[in-house]
Amino acid sequence: MDGTGSKKVKNKITGVEYTLPPSSFHDKVVGFLDCFPIEDMRAYQQARKLLAVDVRGNYHFYEGLKGRFEEFLTKLADKSPDKIREFAEGPWTDVGFDLLQIGFSTLSEDFYQTLYRLLITLQTKLNKRLHKGAPLHQIGLINLTLGRLTKAKRHFQLAITEDIIDDKQHYKNRPGYIVLRNEFQIPPMKR
């Protein structure tokens, strides 16, 4: 602790230093990432709320946010594919959804496209299949919200393909399949 009541902390995955309580956007992003893996949901939600406020209307902040998330995901590749998936389906998806909620559909879609590209890159680097259904589903959701039905359907179809590869027994319980059945009235798929 210094004289102001703040303390310097290092992110446990990347080693990047930040200040608590957060005094800058950098501190807010790195502090949020340090909530992963999520152990304290209240602290996680508080840190998450701080991000959307600064990103609103500021592309510079968005690029910084995306850069830190990319760095964090890449460092998780050194840990395990399961940690990559947890992060992609948790914090990355949550922040992308927050961007959509505050009216930044283009940034939200870009955020998920970035995640999808990174997962493909990491999959090649690790020589191990990574599940990419979360970003595909979210891109579909954004396009459905914007009325771009053809693009939405394509992304939901790609998401359900990922889900089938991942879990043939339970893919019908996954969001991509449910949306395709309800919004696009596709016939039930046979096992």
Image (cartoon, grey):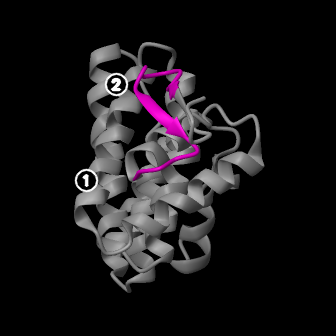
For the N terminus, the quadrant is: top right
The mark closer to the camera, 1 or 2, is 1
Name the residue rendered at 67%, 54% in the picture: 45
Disc assigned to residue 133: none
Name the residue rendered at 39%, 21% in the picture: 75
Which portion, as a residue range, is magenta?
Answer: 9-24
- x then y, percent, for residue 97: 51, 64
Residue 166 inside the magenta-drawn segment: no
**Which image quadrant for residue 157?**
bottom left
Q: Secondary structure at mark 2?
A: helix
Q: Amino acid at mark 1?
A: Glu
Query: Quick check: 77 above or below 32?
Result: above
Q: Amino acid at mark 2?
A: Gln
For the C terminus, the quadrant is: top right
- x then y, percent, for residue 178: 63, 65
Task: Give the residue at mark 2.
Answer: 123
- x then y, percent, for residue 124: 27, 21
Q: CA distance from mark 1 to mark 2?
A: 23 Å
